[in-house]
Image (cartoon, rainbow, N blue to C red):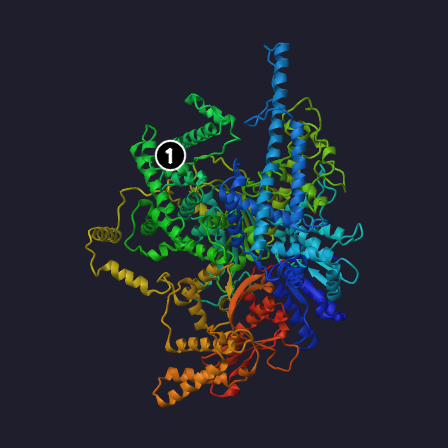
Amino acid sequence: MLVVAGAGSGKTYTMTRRIIALIERGVPPERILGLTFTRKAAGELLTRVCAAVADMRDEATFLKPSVFTYDAFFQSIVRQYGLLVGFDQNTQPLSDAGAIQIAVDVIDRHMDLLRGHDLGAFNTLAKRVLALSGAIGSAMIGGEVTDMTEAIARVRAWDDAFARRVREAIGSDPVPEQEPKPRKPKRTKRDTDATWTAKLDDYQRAQHEACVYHCANLVGVAETRNILLDLVEAYVAEKRRRNMAEFGDFTIAAYQLVTRFPSIGERYRRRFSHVLLDEYQDTSTTQASLIATLFHGRGTAVNAVGDPFQSIYAWRGASPGAFRMFQRDFAMPSGSRPYALSVTRRNPRIVLDAANALTLPLRQAPRRPGSSLMREVDVTPLGTLAGAAEGTIGVLGYDTLGQEIDGVVRFCRMSVRPIAQAVSAGDSAAKDPWNPGDPHGRSVAVLFRSKKTMPLYQQALEAAGLTTLVVGYSAMLERPEIRDILALLHVVADHTDAASLMRLLATPRFGLDAARLTALASIAENLNMETRYRALVAAGLASAEAPRGQWAAIVRDHRNEVANAVFLPDVMLRGDLDALIDDDRFDGESRRVILNAAGALRQVHDLIGRPLADVVREAVRALDLDIDTVVAQAFRSDSEATGKATDGARIDPTLANVPMDAVIDLVDTYTTEIAAGSTPTLRGFMAWVDALNSVDDDTSMLNADRRADVELMTIHQSKGLEWDAVAVVGLESGVFPSDEGDGLRIETDEEHAGGIEDGRWHAPEYRETARTWLDDPTAVPVPIRADAGILPRFPHDAPVDEDPIATMDDSGFDDVETIDDEVYGTLRGIGDGIDDVDPDSWHLTQAEEYGRRLHADERRLMYVALTRTKGEMLLTYAKSKDLGRGVEGETKGARASNFWTEVHDAFHARPDAVSQPANLPDGVEPTTSAPQGFFIGERAAAYEDAVVGEALLEPVEEVDGGGTLPWPASLSETVESRLVAAADAVRAVRSGQTGASGPLLARARMLVADEDLMSSQAEDDRLDEEIRVRAQRILEGSRQSVTGLQARAGRMSEREERRYWRGVVRPIPTVASPAASAGTRFHAWAERFVDAAIPGVFDDAAAGLGGETRAAMLADLEAQERDRDRVNADAVERELIAWERRLASSPWAARTPVWAERPIAGPLPQFDGIIANGKLDAVFAGGLDPDDAAKRFTIVDWKTGRRPRTARQVAEKLVQLDLYRLLLAAVADVPLDSIDAALYYVSEPDESRRLVRAEVKTEQDIIAELSSGVPEQSDDD
């Protein structure tokens, strides 16, 4: 059964009621399986079901359904049966950082494969390897292809067949160096028949050359992919060698198991009679194939729930047309339609009208059909509940980015205003009068398609007095000073990355103009040409006697035989750089700047091989950022435009350097996250940072306890979340829909421009083009994908159900014109006697097919953005990137996104649209230009006045567009005295006359005394929260200790939790107390005592190998006890001897031990394979009840501290044992319920009080309690 659940339509509630209804009908709960994508969603679903069933049965205990994430469920299959396909059951999940580091290591070892090929910068190559590996793993597995080896071989076979066919079409025709741009000739009066014929011949020749050029590029892509395939093969082998696997590898292994061993599927079908699949639109092709293979059959009912309009993860492997493929894979009857949940409980009416208008093109069949024989299931338009609020929507287009930011700030301030006013009036418990039931105020979000402008919005919101929360690393990585650091590190890590160096030299820090940059690049280009020429001479491919003026042409003729050898960073590191730039193209200042930049580069380069954190700190120092940020802080005041710092400006170096500290934190995160045994490298680190900046951060760091007025994130991050008011910004053409990467181009079909007709909205039609899989070496060839049936065919008339490799010779690719027409349609746009042919009759080229698909992907993303709000929505764009609010004359620049235009055109003619503020006094001239657009809905007038009217009345400040302060500046006495004191201190150091006291030393002492090194202005609660958030960032995605998971789950006392988080942020060595030292000594003694009874551990003692027997230890203990009574031993020693005696006399001394002080690390499939580590004090054979045959092990944790008194204290202590049980069950591959655990307090004199048993908890109980320890985003859609 398929259920299409629209945004906010109650999907989770429906799934809950479905499970409850099954249980009410007599289906055993343990025979129900639920799969979803996030741990939080899994825990939420299970919690709701448990609560409902408990109420229904009037009892709290019952066998529970199994609810997993998809990845955790697939891992559980592999953990149980993996050895059948050679998959080690102890294989560790691989983090993103670990994957990048392995890819970097593989590339380093296979540089010979890259010789003579331009595959981009090193970081780009690492990302390409991972991208192709991921694409193969998510799109190729299915049918007869069951593993990566088979999939890689099939991709290579298709590439070879296609490249051979295209080469045959090119034949002996020369390939142009640059793309020809043929223009249709015009016959002039002077043209004779002969000259006109010659023009036509030249035109046809240029057309043919253009097609040859394009076809040669197609061959180049296939050849590049073949090189990448070699690296992917090596990457797959290296993962296997290191016993590491990505989540996709577990899915592939599970697919191998269920296809090669059908009995495994039969067991799962017997175990689960009902399977519910959540968010099915986000499953990959491989996941879908595995689910179908596993559960399609008699005896299992499968129910998939999701929303095709929220399918926004195609770029990371989600299968297009997942619901239609489900119908095919589960052999549903033709013509069957999904059930629909089409009433939203979230969105107001006006916003829903906009969402339905925007998705109209997704519901209509296009006039020009594509070549795919299947399309996704239909989706019913969303409706609202009776009596739903009308809501408000604003559609505003500004002249400048500064105006747009100002308008969004005003919108956010207006949206949180009711609670803000109440708080300022002293009523901290005030309720929002717009939403009387909400005691916590209103939530607001600003959503972005791109992260580039996010820091600007954050700064403006905070300047307006609003608190903000930015998810992930986005804002930090876009800060100018951080971009400078990363640019420098990029150049040090990869000398071929001249682009990063040019960017750094062009920043205000160095300020080289275009002419000097060009001159510098020409020096590098000339040196590179000379080096390549000498290599050709050495190889016998060029004459050593050739005149100097011919060298460039000779190198150009042999460009494929000799690779580039000298890059701009190499030039900057040369010892003779001063002489190289000693010519008329550089003046004295530019030479000084270049040498300074070279010095910074050399300063960092000399530290290669040192710890990563040292390299990054040196980059900060090399750019003087540690000083510059402090000075900049002094100037950051209301009088910034005049260059004068105020006397009240507070200089806080710690606060000023927080961004640089955050980069060091990134190093710590990366180093912790990579696989054990891997060596962190600068190249690997930079590739990982690039990946952070190019994909959307997880919303796992969103903390419900940390409240902010406004949250800023990308639209991808917002999926599953909701707010009272939402602004979607940056709706410019080329930004949203985005043309980044795929080169999406969209033009309105003027003959079908749409609009309001007869009171109804008709969507415009478009002509779209984009880069395709044929242009992308990291993409899998579509004809051989497992889901090829729902994708455009290639060629457009390719036969169905035939092997595309075997039929390549029958593809019709006989000449370059035919191939070009299938992919690009170059000749269609330039005319060749076909001007009278109706373009709508042509088949779609691949560029058009994928332009249409990418446009639809972007449209679905816009739908997700629109449906995030419960109340108000604002859509904005700006024509220019000018940060000022003032405008002189007409502004030209970016066009509005077609999404913005569609919503604008669908509503602008409505009589209730408000496009003029009512708060402008008569006769008062606006201070700036008014935006284009309107507000519409129940609070349209109020928002128009607040967002537009107030902006038109506010004076416009001058904005310094140069990004520099006037110099010399007028300093305040405070700042000037500090700078003078700093200069004096530097001079004193240089002359060796440093004093023993003074303000600098006092300041250092103050800094060292602050154990948190946080802003001294922070209050206690806020400081604790800042520390916790920062510590979670350090630990994010890394290997987790059991103690860390306890802290994240909030299962520690307040004092313990505070101590833990501070230790993560700033580890400070501490002197152990006598009690702690005694506890350490006892644990060492207990380890020896337990080890002495483990069979085989000390069997060689008699041979003099240093073993120790129980008898010897007990004799020694008795001697200590006698000495204790004779000698005046101190209290700590007496206590230690007592602890040892209590253990030696306890029942544990008679039990059979299995391990002592065993380090344990492994994945927790229940938490998406997060790797946790800890140490087990002791593990004994059997259960707490030695006669319980069902028990395999008992974990015992020795305790020397005070026994917990309250139930809460006991529960906090026992959380650690719950995690130990999960870890041991995963590592030892035994059922969780076969493991007992207990605390044993040797500090208790009364033997009856020493044992504290762990509660009997199922895996689901532990997951539900600890889900906050590894937080996930909410996903209620």
In this rendering, the count of numbered labels is 1
Quadrant in which the N terminus appears? bottom right
Looking at the rendered structure, the secondary structure element under dot 1 is loop
Question: Between 61 and 79, which is closer to the camera in this rendering?
Answer: 79
The three-letter amino acid code for the residue at tag 1 is Asp
Q: Let me know if residue 354 appears in the view.
A: no
What residue appears at the point 63 percent right and 10 percent down from the top-left corner?
194
Q: In which quarter of the image is residue 515?
A: top left
Q: Residue pushed farthest front?
A: 1103
In this rendering, would 687 be left or right of 619?
A: right
Instruction: Report which residue position mark 1 lands on.
Output: 513
In this rendering, would 353 be left or right of 527?
A: right
Question: Between 364 and 113, which is closer to the camera in this rendering?
Answer: 113
Q: Where is residue 157 in the image (x, y as percent from the top left)?
A: 67, 40
Quadrant in which the C terminus appears? bottom right
Q: How crowded is mark 1: few (under 14 residues within 10 Å), some or many (20 or more)?
A: few
In this rendering, would 814 be left or right of 1200?
A: right
Q: Let me know if residue 709 appears in the view.
A: yes
What residue appears at the point 63 percent right and 17 percent down from the top-left corner?
201
Q: Is residue 147 above or below residue 706?
A: above
Q: Where is residue 868 in the image (x, y as percent from the top left)?
A: 58, 54
Q: Is residue 1235 above or below residue 944?
A: below
Q: Is residue 1142 above or below residue 374?
A: below
